[in-house]
Image (cartoon, grey):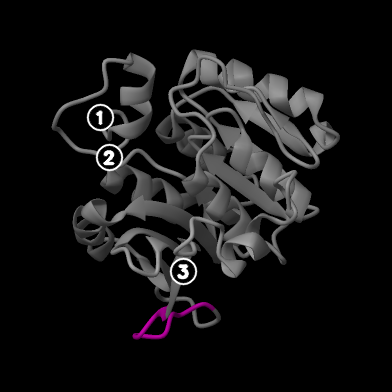
Amino acid sequence: MPFTFKQFHIDDHGCGMPVSTDAVILGAWAPLSKAVNILDIGAGSGLLSLMATQRSQAKVTAIELDDTAALACESNFIASKWTERLQVKHCAIQAFSQTHLASGLPLFDHIICNPPYFKGGTQSKNALRAKARHTDTLDFSCLIKAISQLLSADGAASLILPSQSMTPFNQALAASELAFSQVMDIADSASKAVHRHVFTLVHKHNSSTKPNPNSQMQHFFIKESDGSYSKEMIALITGFYLKY
């Protein structure tokens, strides 16, 4: 369904994944202050790209494989006030990576991604939603490889995953040249168990970005016990949600 933010509008009609709290948290949390060239992998309707352009002066390239989502993303970009800083590439990230690396164009100093995360199991009857949520077309190893190839030496990548997906993601990450630099654990409230993790990745062997072995950890909860948003959540969404 359409969703209006303070500075832009998202029409996600026909997209596999609608606007979600996860995506908003990632888009508001990602450290973009120094970014000038951002890549959004699996952009969907373009929410993360639009949040990134609002928060920075960077140019953003959005990659989206699904036909309907790519069209929605392009439409939302054109309707925004930042259209000159936004572009959509309708292709798989593997194909984009190959073409981009062969072109000799600059690498990206920040990559954002709200990736598919379920492997196997029961899939949604909605084919587009299943495609967006499951790793059939982009498993963690392929995603991490693409990030490693496309991320500049001193760049960072920001992602969000549910707790049950962290073990397979960690296994894939261990075989790569990337490592965690910051992790924030997310719970619905202070009384609930952690269920999501938003984090940044950097290249392991670059001296300027080499992560601390005890990656910076944070804890974050979305709501207070009475159901209202926590002050930390309000601080994240103030620039985006109309009510705050």
Q: Secondary structure at mark 3?
A: strand
Q: Position of residue 106 (x, y in %)?
A: 65, 51
Q: Which residue is mark 2?
A: 139
Tell which tag, 3 or 2, sits nearer the viewer: 3
Q: Which residue is mark 3?
A: 220
Q: Is residue 6 left or right of residue 22?
A: right
Q: Which of the 4 quarters of the picture holds residue 178? A: bottom left
Q: Which residue is mark 1?
A: 136
Q: Position of residue 229 (x, y in %)?
A: 56, 58
Q: Is 189 one of the magenta-colored residues? A: no
Q: Is residue 122 left or right of residue 13?
A: left
Q: Earlier in the sequence, mark 3 or mark 1?
A: 1
Q: Earlier in the sequence, mark 3 or mark 2?
A: 2
Q: Secondary structure at mark 2?
A: loop
Q: Position of residue 91 (x, y in %)?
A: 49, 24
Q: Is residue 189 visible?
A: yes
Q: Is residue 169 above or below residue 73?
A: below
Q: Which residues are magenta?
A: 209-216
For the residues bearing labels 2 and 1, Cβ distance under 8 angstroms: yes
Q: Residue at x 24, y 61 (%)?
A: 170
Q: How many marks?
A: 3
Q: Is residue 112 above or below residue 204?
A: above
Q: Amino acid at mark 2?
A: Asp
Q: Is residue 88 above or below residue 34?
A: above
Q: Amino acid at mark 3?
A: Phe
